[in-house]
Image: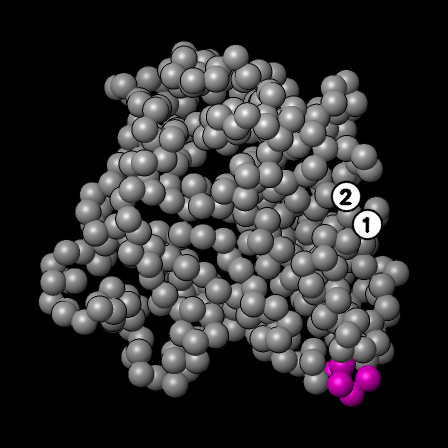
Amino acid sequence: MKIELDQKGKEALKKLLEAKEQNIEVSQWLNDYLENQYDAIDEEAIAKKKEEDAFSECFYALLGFDPDDPEVERRKEENGFGAFQAVDEKLMKENPYGKTIHIKGNPARGRYALSTNYFAPYEGFNLEDTISSGEETNFLEKNTLGYFSSKVSYPVLTDKNEVWMSLTPHEILTMQKPIEEAKGNVLTFGLGLGYFAFMASEKEEVSSVTILEKDNNVIRLFEENLLPQFPHKEKIHIRKEDCFHYYERKMGEQNYDFLFVDIYHTAEDGLSTYLRLRREEQVGGPTLSFWIEPSLLCLLRRYVLTLIEENLSGYEEKDYLEPTDDEENNLLTLFKAMKDITINTKEDLYHLLSEDGLRQLARKPL
């Protein structure tokens, strides 16, 4: 990577790096709430407030923030920090999968089991993808969180009693676009509760849905308890396969029109999969769609900015060799992909960091 920025480019990079740090800071605040304090706001706390923004007031108080502090105000405006949306329970109860598929008891196979969980009233949850507002704001990120005002149940697949997959508002909303785009012969990586497969099979434009799943217990649990309830089960085909092995060696055996990838839980554990499959994307192959791609691209942008900053600090390839975790592996992968990139101007920076630029980078061979 060769970086020789002019003055406007240096000024732009400074703002981009400041925005990246702000994005990380707000993400850490939200993660602290979602992981440790998601159920700390309840009906009693809300009842003490009469303003329309009662939930946000409780949220700021819970995290120890003064909502009138100028820095908090700025993050409210720029990152949507504290923006909660009251979600209508119809999103869950009138969803075709939710109306059709019912889990009876707690069926289990091996370490996996199906069961039902629930959101308590005013329990906070991540609602939609992390999105970037674009270069005009130096790619500041926004997150929308939500809550129900009443108790709402949802199905889960557990692995050793830990939630592995679940059907929440986040899954429903972040899968809307891939479901709308699915057509013809569809291939999907990962089975879980079969939500994407169910919704895709309901479409007239979809003739078949092939699911790759490597764990036989997950397959049997699905086939015995969920698949019989599918209205279009004749469209569903399950193959016991490792997704990566199949993608690299067997994709040519059948003609697929659309491939949906959903074998990770978060952007953090999905970025390496995204980079690997984008890099091996086949010309003339099926349309490739990734769950939570907007969130993946926001995270990828942070990595690219980190590499640019470290390049200017004198980092070389030797500093990325022998990675010990996923984050270091991603940095090494991207360092190799960016070796022949030249950045001289503000426009170069913004193009590289745009969604199209990041997709192009992800596709680059190493």
Q: Residue at x 62, y 55 (%)?
A: 297
In the rendered structure, which amino acid carries the disc numbered 2? Arg
- 114 lies left or right of 248: left
> Residue tagged by mark 1?
364
In depth, the one of 310 and 41 nearer the eye is: 41
In front: 352, or 14? 352
Residue ID at (49%, 53%): 129
Check disc 2 and report the residue beneath it: 279
Look at label 1 and name its amino acid: Lys
Badge 2: how crowded within 10 Å, few (<14), some, or many (20+)?
some
Q: Residue 228, relative to residue 47: is it above or below?
A: above
Q: Nearer the viewer, residue 339 or 121?
A: 121
As for residue 110 lying within the magenta part, the answer is no
Image vertical order of residue 304 relative to residue 18, above or below? above
Q: Quadrant of residue 180?
A: top right
Which residue extends farthest bottom? 7
Q: Position of residue 59 (x, y in %)?
A: 28, 66
Residue 213 sits above or below residue 5 on the image: above
Front-most of residues 114 and 137: 137
Secondary structure category for the residue under label 1: loop
Q: Which residues are magenta?
A: 6-10
The answer to whether any part of residue 54 appears in the image is: yes
Crowding at dot 1, Cα within 10 Å, few <14 / some 14-19 / many 20+, comes out as: some
Q: In screen coordinates, is 315 left or right of 56?
A: right
Q: For residue 5, which quarter of the picture?
A: bottom right
Q: Quadrant of the N terminus?
A: bottom right
- The secondary structure making up most of the magenta span is helix
Compare marks 1 and 2 and give the one earlier in the sequence: 2
